[in-house]
Image (tube, helix red, strand yellow):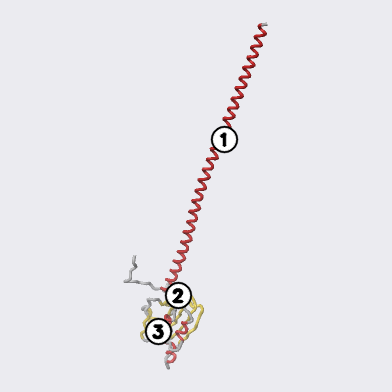
Amino acid sequence: MKNIQSSIVIGVMCFLLSLGIAIQISSMKNEKTVVAKENTENQLRDEVLEMTNEYDKSYNELDKLQEKLESLRNEVAESNEMSKDWSENLLQINNCLGLSNVKGKGIILQIKSGDILQVINALNNAGAEAIEINENRITLYSKILNDGDQVTLDGKVLESPYNIKAIGGDALYGAITMPGSYIDSLKKNVGYDYEVNISKSDSVEIKKYEGIYNFNFAKILE
């Protein structure tokens, strides 16, 4: 009888011990699950925070790059505008100095002999923008001398007939042909071999000045 009671007590204790172990194991599993879940959430939270920081950093860098790009665009536009202005100014300067080939409406004049300087002065006074004699461009510094029937331009002797081209408005033709003009006086000079031919043209071509400008006294101020 005692053996049976001992066996029952031992069985109950084993059962209780097994139940305790099972409960402890289950509790440990739950704790591990909770810890693992918390670790996963923390890791995800850290990753989201890191991605947010990276996004903010990239966005700020992109914003700076866009500002720099806009600044460069403005600089290029301003530079192009300045280059355009400089190019236009340079063209105007070259035209004034006779350093460019030009084309436009004007007149073509051929005269066998006479005071060529008076003809050139009349054309300049009438607003000629470009003049040439025998394919030699007249500039602001050109020197024209008449010695009898011999004409020299900047020390170069020109041969007759003198072919003169001028680009400008309608006033050029009037300045040469109007009553009282030098050409008109030549026509009225009986016995004078003026042999003048004048014609208008919408496409007068004048070559650029081929010489060299030398300034011996004028110096550029810094």
Q: In what element is the residue under mark 1?
A: helix
Q: Nearer the viewer, residue 176 or 32?
A: 32
Disc 3: CA contacts within 10 A as few (<14), some (14-19) or many (>=20): few
Residue 95, quarter of the rendered image: bottom left
Residue reaching furthest to the top = 1
Q: Amino acid at mark 1?
A: Glu
Q: Are marks 2 and 1 in contact (CB under 8 Å)?
A: no
Give me the C-alpha separation between circle 2 and circle 3: 22 Å
The numbered dot on residue 207 is 2
Q: Position of residue 185 (x, y in %)?
A: 42, 90
As drawn, 83 above or below 56: below
Q: Which mark sits nearer the N-terminus, 1 or 3? A: 1
Mark 2 vs mark 1, foreground winner is 1
Name the residue located 57 percent from the left edge and 35 percent from the top edge. Answer: 41
Q: In what element is the residue under mark 3?
A: helix
The numbered dot on residue 118 is 3
User: 123 left or right of 59?
Assistant: left
Q: Position of residue 98 (x, y in %)?
A: 42, 74
Q: Position of residue 214 (x, y in %)?
A: 35, 72
Disc 2: CA contacts within 10 A as few (<14), some (14-19) or many (>=20): some
Name the residue located 58 percent from the left edge and 27 percent from the top edge. Answer: 31
Q: Nearer the viewer, residue 211 or 29?
A: 29
Q: Which residue is mark 1?
A: 41
